[in-house]
Image (cartoon, rainbow, N blue to C red):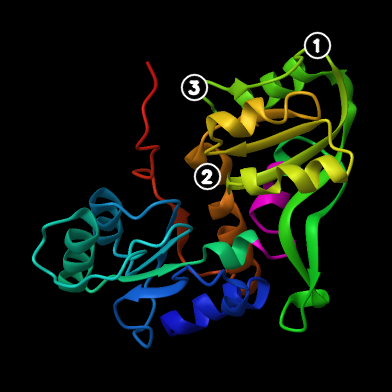
Amino acid sequence: MKISEITAAIEQVAPVSLQEGFDNTGFQAGDPEATATGALLCTDITPAVVDEAVERGYNLVISHHPIIFHPLKKLIGATVPQRVVMQSLRAGVTLYCAHTNMDNAMGGVSFRMAKKLDMTNVDFLQPTERDDAPGGRAGCGVIGNVEAMPAVDVLRRAKDAFQVGSVKYSGDGGKTITRVALCGGAGAFLIPAAIRAGAQLMITADARHNDFIDNNRDIIVADIGHFESEQYTKEIFFEVIRQKFRTFAVDFAKSDINQIKYL
């Protein structure tokens, strides 16, 4: 089958039209019409991931984050994106990403986070009606219920589930929590929506200093890290591909590791 047939299955779940205007979802480099030999799944495309794909004989890498986010004005190996693109083209490996379209899709990134935290009654935090979305609905973030427990216990559960080196949070860690809002990646812009929806705790990433202190009295804000919050997106890719193409070679990249370190 063609590489484009594999990626089309992902786009049935998360159409490219759902991406944000600033994004660059979809094919990044390579030949979509080449015969697919296998797909390696990751959060970030790095030189090590491309090397691993070559070693395994796979000619498709599917990531959550785009390797080409800002326009490339030249290809001389001066930056990591340039080097990765050059490396993949030389090796005949096609690069594809599903980024904010998967963030905004039903069952997407934030829904996977909620699954990891065993949340119930999960729905979009900021929904929109979309004719181009499966089921006619898309949106940003999710909100749902957890069994009643202190906020620090919810955060300990998150720290374990997402393999977090350090959790930053504001507010009263002893407060009993039953309603939680989530957004994979940089989701602090949704804090007002989480407050309006009755969330007592918002878990996201890339929160700024004022995101914590300006909302202290209304909601507990927690930052678990960008990679950590979105790392399970590749599980969605795996399930979508394996469900439609049961004998196709697809696997998680062992070299897909968090580039951010903690002391």
Query: Closer to the N terminus: mark 1 or mark 2?
Result: 1
Residue span colored magenta = 104-113
Distance from the alpha carbon under mark 1 to that under mark 2: 28 Å
Amino acid of disc 2: Gln
Tag 3 secondary structure: loop
| Residue 92 x %, y % | 23, 74
Of 23 and 163, nearer the camera is 23
Amino acid of disc 3: Gly
Tag 1 secondary structure: loop
Which residue is the extreme one toward the top? 174
- Let me know if residue 106 is in the magenta part: yes
Does residue 71 lie above or below 211 as drawn? below
Determine which residue is flagged by label 3. 165
Q: Residue at x 67, y 63 (%)?
A: 104
Left or right: residue 230 compared with residue 129: left
Q: Quadrant of the N terminus?
A: bottom left
Q: Tell me, yes or no, if residue 242 can be seen here.
A: no
Query: Closer to the N terminus: mark 3 or mark 1?
Result: 3
Determine which residue is flagged by label 1. 174
Of 57 and 207, nearer the camera is 207
Question: Quarter-wise, where is residue 77 in the image?
Answer: bottom left
1 vs 2, front mark? 1
Left or right: residue 10 compared with residue 55: right
Q: Residue at x 11, y 57 (%)?
A: 78
Q: What crowding class fits label 2: few (fewer than 14 Cα within 10 Å), some (14-19), or many (20 or more)? A: many
- Let me know if residue 166 is in the magenta part: no
Determine which residue is flagged by label 2. 231
